[in-house]
Image (spheres, rainbow, N blue to C red):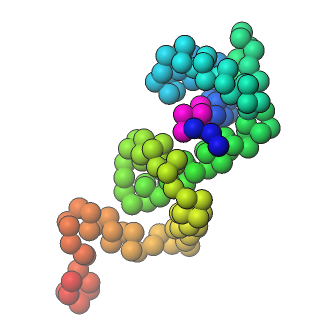
Amino acid sequence: MLSRKAEDYLEAILNIAEKKGYTRVKDIAFALSVKPSSVVEMVRRLSDMALIEYRKYDGMTLTPKGRDIAIVVKERHDTISAFLEIIKVPEEIANKDACIIEHELEPETIEQLKNFVHFVKSAPDYPQWLEHFETFCKAREHPREESGEK
């Protein structure tokens, strides 16, 4: 079982590689707001675990095993972030909170969140209850129905 920190590094390597085509120590340091020396230390550990291939001047790539883990972590993060955005958490905060939450939830919970996010995003029309929820968040009361009742 990997530590939260190791999972965060694998996810960062995947995200950076998807954007830039390669990943270097300085990219990870910037993405995770850590010192390059901390990155080098973790990269060595991940390399020793056969999760990445690291060449000092060429950067790093995920091994198939490392990529599989990184994809699972990214999927958890994306699911939680999407859920938080559905309930009107601002994107930046949703991403930050997803980084924290993604390590704590059980796989069954993640799966249900994934189902919920897919359900909402694939609805043929924007669900009316989401509009009601947005109104509720602003007014702190349920929207009034056509008949004038709460």
**Going by the image, does 85 lie left or right of 50?**
left
**Going by the image, does 134 lie left or right of 52?**
left
Q: Is residue 11 visible?
A: no
Q: Locate the C terminus by quadrant.
A: bottom left
Where is residue 28, by image quadrant? top right
* Residue shown at 20% from the left, 67% from the top: 140
Where is residue 134, by image quadrant? bottom left
Where is residue 23, by image quadrant? top right
Q: Main secondary structure of the magenta part?
A: helix
Q: Is residue 54 visible?
A: yes
Q: Locate the N terminus by quadrant.
A: top right
**Going by the image, does 129 lie left or right of 58?**
left
Percent of width and height locating residue 132: 33, 72
| Residue 5 included in the magenta stretch of the image | yes
Percent of width and height locating residue 98: 47, 47
* Residue shown at 43% from the left, 59% from the top: 86
Percent of width and height locating residue 117: 53, 63
Q: Nearer the viewer, residue 8 or 59?
A: 8
The number of numbered badges drawn on the structure is: 0
Residue sitting farthest toward the front: 1
* Residue shown at 73% from the left, 30% from the top: 49
| Residue 92 included in the magenta stretch of the image | no
Residue sitting farthest toward the right: 64
- In the image, the segment drawn in magenta is 4-9
Q: Nearer the viewer, residue 41 or 141?
A: 41
Percent of width and height locating residue 144: 23, 80
* Residue shown at 39% from the left, 60% from the top: 87
